[in-house]
Image (cartoon, rainbow, N blue to C red):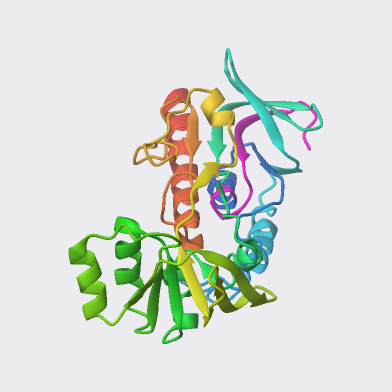
């Protein structure tokens, strides 16, 4: 750690997007601090897919290699800790971590991800990212042609089940209560031999996160291999909001094409800005962020 605690760029969040931004800035000779608390949202996921050259590796393996490579750039420092507060200063921003230590910077990057809000269904959280899935592009190939469920209702349920039908024909929609599908949507699912179960879910039976059965509140057990759903979420970090960064109607940080938030000098990248939650996309956004920050720093000083 540098003694003066002053940086050109501080990156809060050291997963894929944060590391990619750090690499781009390190290669641009920028003095950077990456602060990471070590709690990624995909911590339970056994394998990552659709990331060229890294297909099938564990998220931990990819993250470990990323850190090893970013550490080669000597102007990039790392802090294992939790950023707890941030404020504007005359020349930029100040970030405080849980220990009370503070760091100053001209530019801020938030690559802090989101926190999924789990339903109170026993077995759900233990299976999240393993056999309870959010993305068929990340995991659909591994459960292709398997007995698959979608936990959703209404427009979202119809949208999700039509998407997942690309990977399997053995589909059931679990609305966990009275269906809110339109008559036209219901008929279309029936015509595609897709079952609709409105009975509420009691629990998921699983082995080490791999679903065996959905147990309904009427006592019926339904064998299942995978369950897709779209969860509500909250931002992992509230610091950007305390700095007056705006959110979209969906709850993501509002950014432009250069990854800039609505506050000058503050950037955001990765899962906290988009529904497209893939490792490859996070890396792409992080790299773009690093390039755009360096461009802005050059323009300000040249």
Residue drawn at x 43%, y 31% is 296
Most extreme residue toward the front is: 218
Q: Nearer the viewer, residue 55 or 274?
A: 274
Look at the image and tell me whether residue 51 can be seen. no
Residue drawn at x 44%, y 44% is 273
Magenta segment, which residues?
1-18
Relative vertical location of residue 272 with respect to residue 267 in this rendering, above or below = below
- On whether residue 3 falls in the magenta region, the answer is yes
Look at the image and tell me whether residue 47 can be seen. yes
Q: Please identify the quadrant where the C terminus is shown.
A: top left
Most extreme residue toward the left is: 184
Residue 210 occupies quadrant: bottom right
x and y percentages locating residue 250 in the rendered image: 39, 42
- On whether residue 128 falls in the magenta region, the answer is no
Q: Nearer the viewer, residue 148 or 251?
A: 148
Q: Nearer the viewer, residue 41 or 20?
A: 41
Q: Nearer the viewer, residue 220 or 12?
A: 220
Q: Is residue 166 left or right of residue 298?
A: left
Residue 111 occupies quadrant: top right
- Give the number of callouts: 0
x and y percentages locating residue 148 in the rendered image: 45, 78
Q: Please identify the quadrant where the N terminus is shown.
A: top right
Residue drawn at x 38%, y 40% is 258
x and y percentages locating residue 252 in the rendered image: 44, 41
Residue 75 occupies quadrant: top right
Relative vertical location of residue 28 with respect to residue 84 in this rendering, above or below = below
Q: Is residue 79 left or right of residue 25?
A: right
């Amino acid at each position: 750690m540098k003694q003066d605690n002053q940086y050109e760029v501080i990156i809060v969040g050291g997963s894929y997007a944060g590391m990619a931004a750090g690499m781009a800035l390190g290669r641009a000779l920028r003095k950077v601090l990456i602060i990471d608390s070590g709690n990624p949202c995909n911590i339970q996921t056994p394998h990552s897919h659709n990331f060229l050259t890294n297909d099938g590796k564990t998220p931990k393996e990819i993250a470990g290699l990323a850190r090893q490579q970013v550490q080669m750039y000597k102007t990039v420092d790392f802090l294992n800790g939790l950023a707890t507060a941030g404020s504007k200063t005359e020349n930029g921003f100040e970030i405080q971590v849980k220990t009370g230590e503070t760091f100053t910077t001209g530019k801020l990057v938030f690559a802090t991800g989101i926190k999924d809000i789990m339903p109170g269904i026993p077995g759900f959280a233990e299976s999240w990212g393993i056999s309870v899935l959010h993305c068929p592009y990340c995991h659909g190939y591994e459960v292709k042609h398997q007995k698959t469920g979608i936990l959703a209702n209404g427009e979202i349920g119809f949208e999700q089940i039509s998407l997942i039908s690309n990977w399997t024909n053995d589909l059931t929609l679990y609305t966990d209560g009275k269906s809110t599908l339109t008559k036209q949507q219901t008929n279309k699912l029936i015509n595609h031999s897709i079952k609709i179960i409105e009975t509420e879910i009691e629990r998921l039976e699983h082995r080490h996160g791999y679903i065996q059965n959905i147990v309904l509140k009427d006592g019926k057990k339904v064998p299942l291999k995978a369950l897709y759903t779209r969860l509500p979420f909250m931002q992992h970090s509230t610091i950007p909001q305390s700095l007056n960064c705006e959110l979209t109607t969906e709850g993501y940080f509002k950014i432009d094409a250069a990854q800039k938030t609505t506050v000058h000098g503050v950037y955001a990248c990765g899962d906290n800005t988009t529904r497209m939650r893939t490792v490859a996309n996070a890396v792409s956004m992080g790299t773009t962020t690093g390039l755009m920050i360096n461009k802005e720093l050059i323009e300000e000083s040249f």
